[in-house]
Image: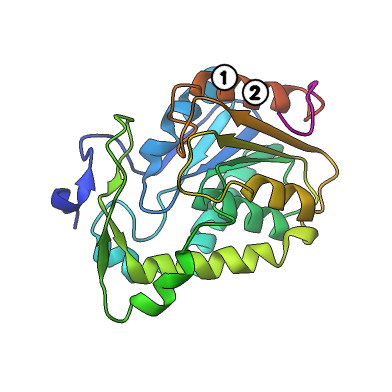
């Protein structure tokens, strides 16, 4: 059951969606504590451009923090795989993108499905300061209060951090870190100058360890952690569309 007391911006749409378009499919995965409201603005722009776009609501999200504390990282991976399989049944080429934890799930899905055409990582949570502490705290603390200031972005999700779920996120993070070399698809990473969630060297860590030969890094100078909702979201959408249209051969430098 949804408990609006624990949800920021409960009025926003945050459920699963699948918007049919052409034979190019794009799977967009939201982040930890969030809902599909996080990826919908980008999804709408891509759907308006003609693509088929899907966004799954991950287990434990959008209802009550207790539900997230009961979820495991493998449940999140399985939900993403189900959405991918449904999308691949109607699309010939598929690109996958994820925000924060969604970036980790993007990488894991790509490892399991090398036929995926390209990856978009938006502020990927590959390194997060003090996340490991959740492994110690969760038997004693159910939630932690979010310390983020209200940035006014149209973000829907929990206003507390379920600690046992954070420990699951840490497990997922370590799992993906150890397997980056197995991932070979073209990848584009988008980070924000004012991101206070992921470690500053997160993108570099991925770029140095992933098996991909084609790598792009866009550093957005005016954005925070949720880059796909922040003030440079339109630029990001244009970058994403250009890379899809050119098969990741759009002019770019390895790092910006």
Q: Residue 129: percent from the left, percent from the top? A: 49, 58
Q: Determine whether the residue tagged by mark 1 lies in a helix, strand or loop.
A: helix
The residue singled out by tag 1 in the image is 235
Q: Does 117 appear above or below 229?
A: below
Residue 226 location, quadrant: top left
| Badge 2: residue crowd in 10 Å (few <14, some 14–19, many ≥20) | some
Can residue 248 be found in the magenta stretch?
Answer: no
The residue singled out by tag 2 in the image is 239
Instruction: Report the side of 221 relative to 151 (left or right).
Output: right
Let me know if residue 73 appears in the view: no
Q: Residue 117: percent from the left, percent from the top? A: 74, 40
| Badge 1: residue crowd in 10 Å (few <14, some 14–19, many ≥20) | few
Between 220 and 110, the residue placed more toward the observer is 220
Q: Quadrant of the N terminus?
A: bottom left
Q: Residues in magenta? A: 250-256
Q: Quadrant of the C terminus?
A: top right
- State if disc 2 and disc 1 touch (CB < 8 Å): yes
Q: Does 154 appear above or below 171?
A: above
Q: Does 75 appear above or below 245?
A: below
Q: Does 188 appear above or below 246?
A: below
């Amino acid at each position: 059951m949804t408990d609006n007391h624990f949800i920021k911006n409960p009025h926003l749409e945050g459920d699963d969606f699948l918007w049919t378009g052409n034979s190019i499919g794009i799977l967009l995965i939201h982040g930890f504590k969030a809902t599909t409201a996080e990826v919908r603005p980008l999804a709408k722009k891509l759907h308006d451009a003609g693509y088929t776009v899907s966004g799954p609501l991950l287990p434990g999200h959008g209802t009550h923090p207790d539900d997230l504390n009961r979820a495991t990282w493998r449940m999140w991976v399985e939900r993403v795989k189900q959405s991918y399989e449904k999308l691949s049944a109607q699309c010939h080429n598929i690109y996958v993108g994820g925000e924060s934890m969604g970036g980790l799930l993007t990488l894991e899905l790509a490892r399991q499905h090398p036929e995926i055409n390209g990856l978009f990582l938006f502020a990927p949570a590959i390194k997060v300061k003090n996340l490991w502490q959740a492994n110690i705290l969760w038997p004693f603390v159910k939630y932690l209060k979010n310390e983020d200031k209200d940035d006014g972005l149209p973000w829907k999700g929990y206003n507390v951090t379920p600690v046992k779920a954070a420990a699951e996120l840490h497990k997922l993070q370590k799992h993906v870190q150890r397997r980056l070399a197995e991932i070979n698809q073209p990848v584009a990473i988008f980070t924000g100058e004012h991101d206070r969630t992921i470690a500053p060297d997160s993108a570099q860590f991925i770029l140095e360890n992933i098996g991909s030969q084609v790598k792009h890094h866009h550093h957005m100078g005016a954005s925070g952690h949720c880059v796909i909702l922040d003030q440079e979201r339109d630029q990001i959408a244009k970058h994403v569309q250009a890379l899809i249209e050119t098969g990741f051969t759009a002019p770019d430098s390895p790092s910006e």
